[in-house]
Amino acid sequence: MSSILIRNAMLIATFDDESRIERNADLYIEGQEIKAIGPQLQVKADEIIDASRMIVLPGLINTHHHLFQTLTRNIPRVQNATLFEWLTTLYPIWQELTPEAVYWSALAGMGELLLTGCTTTTDHLYIFPRGTSAELLDETIRAARDIGMRFYPTRGSMCRGKSQGGLPPDDIVQQPDEIIRDSERLIQTYHDSKRFSMCQIALSPCSPFSVDEGVLREIAQLARQHGVRLHTHIAETRDEETYCQQVYGKRPLAFLESVGWLGSDVWLAHAIHLDDGELSQLAQTQTGVAHCPVSNMRLASGVARVPRMLELDVPVGLAIDGSASNDSSDMLGEVRQCLLVHRLSSGVGAMSAEQALRLATRGGARLFGRDDIGSLELGKAGDCILIDLNQIGFAGALHDPLAAVVFCGSSHIVHTAIVNGEIVVRSGRLTGVDEQSIVEKVNSLGGEMVRRATRRTGIDVLKHR
């Protein structure tokens, strides 16, 4: 059983219930598990890391992502688009997805996440083009294993295509029986409910404008039968609100309630356009929210009322959202933007650096129903990140080292990332995969997808609208 000793850290922020801080202290990981925290630990280890210039944090947790979108970042035609325009332009490109493209795009997104401090991520894959293997989520799981990341993939789905009043083209939606059958296969094949699990499955119909009521009910029943969690998008834009009123005669959250989609086993992406009563309903049902500040700013969707959610004890975690609506997978950058947007929208006291980091650690663990990650405590998983503060971007900022990693820094690349007791980032570089190969492969695959979509549709997405 391998072991790691992080020696003499400048500061260890545990994010336990007491927000305990250890200064000039050690952290010892044996196998998968944190075994000791404290000054001058008398233990032997296979590897010793000198952390005297570093701050140690729990690994960050990303609660909403679309990894395949790393292939279509920064497309000129949608740089200035709102959500529905953005989706309808990109759907034809995503129709060109292949298993190979899904695998390499997942490696790219996960690599960027690991490098910026995220040790656990989810993924919401909802594009399953006709004529392509339906076993696409399997490729993201393979990528997570290859790169060494703790993973919470969600089996997305769309069954209401354009011909049935939905937003997506018919060529990328599936029949309900296909969705249910593959969801069951993925749970049986990959879901691991044990402590320190590296892969757990959730079920995630895409949105009220791409899935019908019957499928939502059936998926909720299937998830609860197998004890897995549920995830979807909700209340992201006013367009979605209008759609739900016209099609269902209900606001988005009321529609979800009507199909059995509120509860402590559910977490919702965005949840921006909710009134006071709806926020109270989230709190009463303990329905969680994945907060995506950068994507919501990028698409001008709005600002979720996270400070009020926290007052009400709504479970909230931090999230990147898709790499094509962010257009990054920078997890520490997301923490900083979370702090800034809520200060702008709600006042300077609305969000502190520690609160933003807590959303990205304990908040994410709560959404996933995990008590083994999200904090640095004895018996918890050996997931942590080390940030070197001996850099010019932190010069003059050591008065408060914990807040420095949010307020300051000229790069969000961490020095070390450890997942499940294994070093996956060392000296700011990924250890398990070749970064340059990922860059070249994703550039090649993404470029080819755009060329094929342009030939098929006649729309040049590389020109601004």
Image (cartoon, rainbow, N blue to C red):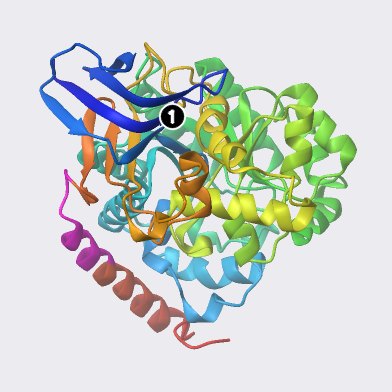
SS at badge 1: loop
Residue at x-position 35% and y-position 48%: 389
For residue 72, what is the image quadrant? Answer: bottom left
**Relative to 48, is 68 on the left or the right?**
right
Residue at x-position 78% and y-position 31%: 311
The residue range painted magenta reads 431-442
Residue 178 picture location, percent across and down: 47, 39
Q: In the picture, which quadrant includes the C terminus?
A: bottom right
Residue 16 picture location, percent across and down: 51, 20
All told, the count of numbered labels is: 1
With respect to residue 131, does 157 lie above or below? Answer: above
Looking at this view, is 217 or 348 the one in front?
348
**Relative to 49, is 463 on the left or the right?**
right
Q: Is residue 303 visible?
A: no
Looking at this view, is 275 or 416 the one in front?
416
Residue at x-position 66% and y-position 29%: 315
Q: Main secondary structure of the magenta part?
A: helix
**Relative to 464, is 299 on the left or the right?**
right
Q: In the picture, which quadrant includes the N terminus?
A: top left
**Relative to 90, is 55 on the left or the right?**
left
Q: Which residue is mark 1?
A: 201
For residue 257, what is the image quadrant? Answer: top right
Looking at this view, is 142 or 244 the one in front?
142
With respect to residue 132, does 313 lie above or below? Answer: above
With respect to residue 26, does 463 lie above or below? Answer: below
Q: Which class describes the residues within 10 Å of circle 1: few (<14), some (14-19), or many (20+)?
A: many
Q: Amino acid at mark 1?
A: Ile
Residue 319 picture location, percent across and down: 54, 45
Looking at this view, is 95 or 43 the one in front?
43
Residue 278 is inside the magenta segment = no
